[in-house]
Image (spheres, rainbow, N blue to C red):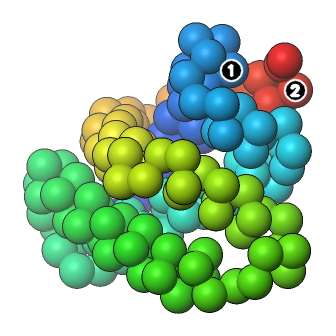
Amino acid sequence: MYLLSLVSATLVVEFLVIFCIKILNMGKTSKLWYKEFGIVAVLCDICSVMIGIMIANFIVPKSSILGLAIAAVIVQIIHDTLFYLFVIRTLPSGANAMIDMMKTYSNEASYSIIFGDAAMMVSTVLAYGVLCHQTMDVSAFAGIVGLYAVTYIIYTK
């Protein structure tokens, strides 16, 4: 696994997701997530996606991009389900502001969260597949542009 390509792909996809949420007005609670928690929300998203894809890669090393995408979605569905059951549902309200917002989001969006997260995983794996075939300079450039763009869009109203 090319970590630079994965980080870069994740940053680019995160920018596109935030763009859709903020500019195209897709998701009231998601918009509030970024407004309330800012760059920390971005870090949570990026780490979650990268951890899921890396676990998928450990499970199916040297698989095709399609195989990695399928494994990543399976890992993500398992993660989302377990996180909901053992963290979101069990942590009392008021104990953690981020989890409180996730409680609200899960009540509003229900199972559609899994589809949104799956779209992020697949998009990131596809972008990763493209960047893996580029030079390190191109991959690094894409990541830096993604990071730069995220730092601005996160504070766009």
Q: Is residue 156 left or right of residue 13?
A: right
Q: Is residue 152 left or right of residue 3?
A: right
Vertical comparison of 128 with 55: above or below: above
- Looking at the image, residue 66 lies above or below residue 103: above
**Of residues 37 and 122, which is closer to you in this image?**
37
Crowding at label 1, few (<14), some or many (≥20) Cα neighbours within 10 Å?
many
Q: Amino acid at mark 1?
A: Lys
In the image: residue 131, left or right of residue 92: left
At horizontal 77% and vertical 23% (from top left) the residue drawn is 153
**Residue type (three-letter) at the residue carrying disc 2:** Tyr
Q: Which residue is mark 1?
A: 22
Residue 84 visible to an observer of this rendering: yes
Quadrant that contains the C terminus: top right
Report the Cα–Cα distance between label 1 and label 2.
10 Å
Residue 126 x, y percent position in the rendering: 29, 38
Q: What's the residue at 65%, 39% (across, down)?
A: 30
Query: In the figure, residue 76 lies in which quadrant?
Result: bottom left
Which labelled disc corresponds to residue 62? Answer: none
Res 44 quadrant in image: bottom right
Indicate the secondary structure of the residue bearing disc 2: loop
Give above or below for 89 relative to 11.
below
Q: Residue at x 22, y 53 (%)?
A: 69
Q: Is residue 136 visible?
A: no
User: Could you tell whether 74 is left or right of 80 in the image?
Assistant: left
Where does residue 131 sit, x and y in percent of width and height?
39, 37
- Give the position of the N terminus as an image quadrant: bottom left
Q: Residue furthest top?
A: 24
Asked whether disc 1 touches disc 2, contact meaning CB atoms under 8 Å apart, the reply is no
Q: Nearer the viewer, mark 1 or mark 2?
A: 1
Label 2 belongs to which residue? 155
* Dot 1 or dot 2, earlier in sequence: 1
Q: What x and y, as percent, mark residue 48?
A: 55, 64
